[in-house]
Amino acid sequence: MFEENVRKALDNVRPSLQADGGDVELVGVSDDGIVSVKLTGACGGCPMAEMTLKMGIENYLKKEIPEITGVVGV
């Protein structure tokens, strides 16, 4: 259920990434609330990928799902 909520939240940020030629894949969610994602397409090699990950995706997911403690790229 928790992972499904993360998937739904990622679906909300996906259009912004796709508009720039990228995307995000959910790799997994740990028991301690760490979400692992993989940025793909243009986002995968973008110099701003870390900022997108932390300031965009992580902030949004934490707001939507308070149990999330962080987001890491793999």
Image: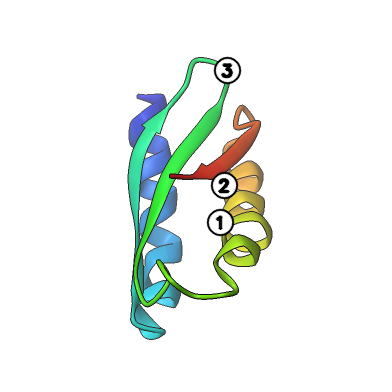
Give the residue at x 37% y 30%: 3
Give the residue at x 42% y 46%: 37
For the residue carrying disc 3, how many other residues have a C-alpha within 10 Å: few (<14), some (14-19), or many (20+)? Answer: few
Q: Is residue 19 above or below residue 10?
A: below
38 or 63, which lies in front? 38
Q: Position of residue 19 (x, y in %)?
A: 38, 84
Give whichever of discs 1 and 3 has the lower sequence position: 3
55 or 66, which lies in front? 55
Picture mark count: 3
Give the residue at x 45% y 64%: 13
Name the residue carrying label 3: 32
Give whichever of discs 2 and 3 has the lower sequence position: 3
Which numbered disc, 2 or 3, marks the residue closer to the eye?
3
Question: Are the two marked residues, 2 and 3, in contact with CB atoms closer than 8 angstroms?
Answer: no
Q: Give the residue type at disc 2.
A: Leu
Q: How is the image coloured?
A: rainbow
Q: Give the residue type at disc 1.
A: Ile
Q: CA distance from mark 2 to mark 3?
A: 15 Å
Which numbered disc, 1 or 2, marks the residue closer to the eye?
1
Name the residue carrying label 2: 61
Q: Position of residue 5 (x, y in %)?
A: 40, 37
Name the residue carrying label 1: 57
In the image, taking residue 57 as reference, residue 4 lies left or right, namely: left
